[in-house]
Amino acid sequence: MSEDTPFRVPNLAERLASGAKFFVILRKDPLRERIDVRTSEVLGLEGDVLFLAQTEPPVSREVVGATLELATLLDEGGALRPVGYAARLLDIPEDYPLPDHALVPALAFSAPGPEDFFETSLRMHYRVPVEEGMGVLVRLGSFETAELLDFSAGGARVRLHGDAQVEVGQSLPFQLLFLGSGYADGDGVVRSVQRAPDGGSLLLGIFFTNMEIRDIRYLERMVARIVSACRQRERDAEYL
């Protein structure tokens, strides 16, 4: 399921009850792989307006009128599944009344319907650790010793053995190969370089860029497929 696929949330009234945890996603920055998520909780539901507690740091009044993403976690047999909806920030009242008559700052959002939700993520990208036998490899520049440690739809962590010399900001062509399926390629911009404790290898943080749309979509599908398979194995293990 992609982030734009509608998802019906069961027992919506319970999800919007006072005290239920919500997350306010102020912005997602795919270029820098950053996401600004702030924790909140439901204060009350009045008609089609959902009141959440002001976050820390607080959401500023400059954001009033903008459409943000609100997310909550569904518990599916012990596995937490984040789902969200697009909500308009209507106001930021400073004196929302609580049942004990205390007045607190709040965030007034448009309330969701049961079919307004879609599957989302509270991370910019889900990072997949590479396990033996997974059949995922990386080719990076002219290096013949590139070892893929983990990857996401936006980047990867790679180990280079030997006396390789790489600098932050350097751009290297890459191919991420899924054996028996295909590959995605583009340029990998080095965002971090760290000498491994053994001194015999470099650990690189790579950001993927200059990818064709078809390669981006293919990589997203493969990440989602691997994550889904891993979760299924985890669920199956509960019965052993």
Image (cartoon, grey):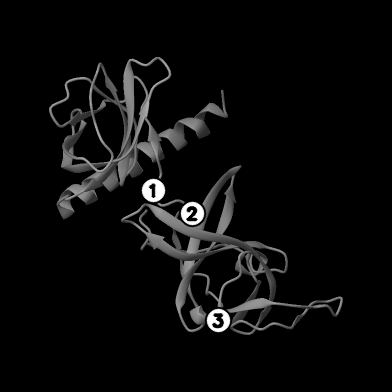
Dot label at residue 61: 3
Figure quadrant of residue 44: bottom right
Q: Position of residue 143 (x, y in %)?
A: 17, 24
Residue at 18 percent across and 31 percent down: it is 140
Instruction: Please report contact status of discs 1 and 3: CB closer than 8 Å, yes or no.
Output: no
**Amino acid type assigned to the residue bearing label 3 in the image:** Arg
Query: Helix, strand, or loop for circle 1?
Result: loop
Q: Is residue 133 visible?
A: no
Residue at 40 percent across and 14 percent down: it is 198
Give the distance between the C-alpha atoms of the residues marked 1 and 3, in whole angstroms: 29 Å
In this rendering, which labeled residue sits more in front, label 1 or label 3?
3
Specify few, some or many for label 3: CA neighbours under 10 Å numbering under 14, 14-19, or 20 or more: few
Q: Position of residue 191 (x, y in %)?
A: 32, 42
Residue under circle 2?
Answer: 122
Q: Position of residue 123 (x, y in %)?
A: 45, 51
Figure quadrant of residue 134: top left
Specify few, some or many for label 1: CA neighbours under 10 Å numbering under 14, 14-19, or 20 or more: some
Residue under circle 1?
Answer: 125
Q: Position of residue 12 (x, y in %)?
A: 60, 67
The C terminus, quarter of image: top right
Q: Is residue 98 left or right of residue 49?
A: right
In this rendering, which labeled residue sits more in front, label 3 or label 2?
3
Which is more toward the observer, 42 or 40? 40
Give the distance between the C-alpha atoms of the residues marked 3 and 2, in whole angstroms: 23 Å
Instruction: Please report contact status of discs 3 and 2: CB closer than 8 Å, yes or no.
Output: no
Q: Is residue 212 left or right of residue 70?
A: left
Q: Give whichever of discs 3 and 2 has the lower sequence position.
A: 3
Residue at 23 percent across and 51 percent down: it is 217
Q: Is residue 15 left or right of residue 116?
A: right
Query: Helix, strand, or loop for circle 3?
Result: helix
Query: Helix, strand, or loop for circle 2?
Result: loop
